[in-house]
Image: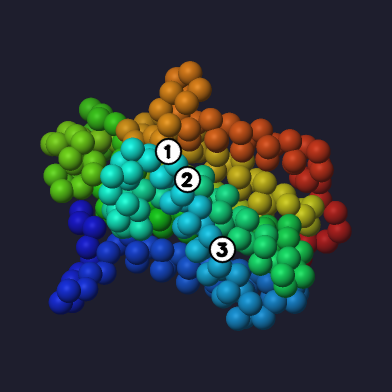
Amino acid sequence: MHPVLFELGPFQIRFYGLMYAIGIICGVYLIQREVHRKQIALSADDVINFVMFSVICGILGARLYYIGFSWSNYQNDLWEIPKVWHGGLAIHGGILGGTLGGWWFVRRHHAPFWKMADIAAPALILGQALGRFGNFMNGDAHGTPTTLPWGIVFPPTSIAGRQFPGMPLHPVMLYEMAINVGIFLCLWKIRTRPWKEGFLFCLYLLLYSIGRFVVSGFRADNLGENLLGSLSAPHVISLVIIAAAGFWMIKGRLWEQNGHAD
């Protein structure tokens, strides 16, 4: 595995960036399709702007969240902060930043937030799945050493390879990628049922956070180790999201179906 797909003179096409580009294209397509099906008054250009603005806010939130938990790695080299291709995007910060950006955008365009959140949920988890493949090729967001037969030895130039040279590691990026693809397929299959507004988005948060909590047990680079007893920041935040999404679903009885499938 190698983080660079190909080079053209001084320019590099990296898997990490390519996965983001593919995720954005897929997101625009899926969201445009659902906006049209649900007859929401947003143009094709509006959808593209919605996706791009949410992605930018998500990347900003992911980077700020990561730096907040890793400030000691950046305080003496501030030029490293914008170099996201070196790794250092925390998905929980990305979800928060992207959601806030999306909320602001749909309010500006007088679109229904919860309907747009439900529409965006499958595209969002698919984008996360693609991003994990980028992490795999980058050799970051890596796992702990393992003796299991599918353990992977990462190149010595990667973050994983430098931390654990020559040692097979849990390919946690692929674990999470598989979980995310499964969540996408589930959300996409049930999306046309007449759920109450907000159900799909809350279900996305719930399922992803459960998966992330489990996968984080095999991660070697969890942020905020021992943040709460033996729990790291991803464990704690996942539990908070599980509780919040579960509470909102129960409070609104969002699983109840009404009307006809759309």
Q: Earlier in the sequence, mark 3 or mark 2?
A: 3
Hey, which quadrant is residue 108 in on the image?
bottom right
Whether pointer 2 and pointer 1 mark residues with C-beta atoms closer than 8 Å, the reply is yes
Q: Earlier in the sequence, mark 3 or mark 1?
A: 3
Mark 2, residue position: 65
Q: Residues within 10 Å of mark 3 (few under 14, many from 20)?
A: many
Residue 102 visible (yes or no): yes
Q: Amino acid at mark 2?
A: Tyr
Q: Amino acid at mark 1?
A: Phe
What's the distance in space between the residues labelled 3 and 2, CA to CA?
A: 16 Å
Provide the secondary structure element on which disc 1 rests. Answer: helix
Residue 9 is left or right of residue 38, and the answer is: left
Residue 237 is left or right of residue 254, and the answer is: left
Mark 3, residue position: 54
Q: Amino acid at mark 3?
A: Ser
| Looking at the image, residue 142 lies above or below residue 8 | above
**Residue that appears at 77% across and 55% down:** 197
Q: Picture coordinates of residue 257 (x, y %)?
A: 81, 51
What's the distance in space between the residues labelled 3 and 1, CA to CA?
A: 23 Å
Mark 1, residue position: 69
Q: Quadrant of the C terminus?
A: bottom right
